[in-house]
Image (spheres, coloured by chain):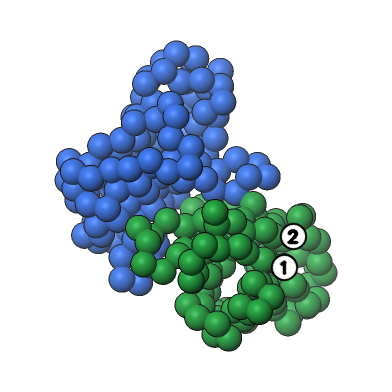
Chain colours: A blue, B green
């Protein structure tokens, strides 16, 4: 099924550990983005990309890195996890019919 | 900047009751407006949208009208079902920008028998 695939679905990290959240889409969408969802705050944009090789910061970029080497993939990297990064992370791509969201990654940093 | 304000939840209704979830916005340009729904354990799905003033978006019995004069996009449904229990997000994107969605905080709807 065409869509946005996120892995892993759940992850627990210790403070200071690093990890990469994976996001892949098979719809040939140029625009991809990462959001975090926190209670009472809705979804906030972390980073986005308008095409391979092009990325930019969103509303809450600190502590996160991204790269876009291919159209399909847009990984989100946490270099040194902090408890404040405990959240649910959503990847989304945008095409002619609008946005498609992945099912999310629930990350807990202890 | 751009912002979206939604009514606080949770909203608890009996089945077949009328639903209204209020949404107002501020925008620095000309926005398109959206309602997304998130069912438990899932990602966001587009429920409906409107791209210009006075447009009415509709889907699955839900409706919302783009009111430029009141900068609002309230979500309504005449008769809710238990299966409508979810979190609803109002969102906007400014036409012609790099497609950045701005979300409201979400409103949780719980429908009981």
Image quarter in which the N terminus of chain B is found: bottom right
Q: Position of residue B44 (x, y in %)?
A: 50, 57
Dot 1: chain letter: B
Q: Which residue is mark 1?
A: B22
Marks 1 & 2, CB-CB < 8 Å contact? yes
Which of disc 2 and disc 1 is earlier in sequence?
2
Q: Is residue A14 at all visible to an observer of this figure?
A: yes
Image quarter in which the C terminus of chain B is found: bottom right
In the rendered view, does B20 fall on the left or right side of B105? right
Q: Are marks 1 and 2 on the same chain?
A: yes
Q: Is residue B100 above or below residue A74?
A: below
Disc assigned to residue A82: none
Q: Position of residue A82 (x, y in %)?
A: 51, 20
Residue at x 30%, y 55% (from the top left corner) = A31
Q: How would you rate the neighbour count of disc 1 (Cα within 10 Å): few for under 14, some for 14-19, many for 20 or more?
A: some
Q: Is residue A6 at all visible to an observer of this figure?
A: no
Decide which of A60, A68 is in the foreground and name it.
Answer: A60
Q: Position of residue A19 (x, y in %)?
A: 36, 24
Q: How would you rate the neighbour count of disc 2 (Cα within 10 Å): few for under 14, some for 14-19, many for 20 or more?
A: some
Q: Quadrant of residue B73?
A: bottom right
Question: Tag 2, which secondary structure?
Answer: loop
Q: Position of residue A102 (x, y in %)?
A: 41, 51
Badge count: 2
Residue at x 59%, y 56% (from the top left corner) = B3
Residue at x 39%, y 53% (from the top left corner) = A92
Residue at x 67%, y 66% (from the top left corner) = B23
Q: Which residue is mark 2?
A: B7
Dot 2: chain letter: B
Question: Tag 1, which secondary structure?
Answer: loop
In the rendered view, does A72 fall on the left or right side of B79? left
């Amino acid at each position: 099924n065409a869509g946005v695939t996120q892995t892993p679905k759940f992850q627990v990290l210790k403070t200071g550990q690093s990890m990469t959240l994976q996001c892949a889409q098979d719809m040939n969408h140029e625009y991809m983005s990462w959001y975090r969802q926190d209670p009472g705050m809705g979804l906030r944009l972390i980073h986005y990309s308008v095409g391979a090789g092009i990325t930019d910061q969103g509303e809450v970029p600190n502590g996160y890195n991204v790269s876009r080497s291919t159209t399909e993939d847009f990984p989100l990297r946490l270099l040194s996890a902090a408890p404040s990064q405990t959240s649910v992370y959503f990847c989304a791509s945008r095409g002619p019919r609008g946005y498609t969201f992945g099912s999310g990654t629930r990350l807990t940093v202890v | 900047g751009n912002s979206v304000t939604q009514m606080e939840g949770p909203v608890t209704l009996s089945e077949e009751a009328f639903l209204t979830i209020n949404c107002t916005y501020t925008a620095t340009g000309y926005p398109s407006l959206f309602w997304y729904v998130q069912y438990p354990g899932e990602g966001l799905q587009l429920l409906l949208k409107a791209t210009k003033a006075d447009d009415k978006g509709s889907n699955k019995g839900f409706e919302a009208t783009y009111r430029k004069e009141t900068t609002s996009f309230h979500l309504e449904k005449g008769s809710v079902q238990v299966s409508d229990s979810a979190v609803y997000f109002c969102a906007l994107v400014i036409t012609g920008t790099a497609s950045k969605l701005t979300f409201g905080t979400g409103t949780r709807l719980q429908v009981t028998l």
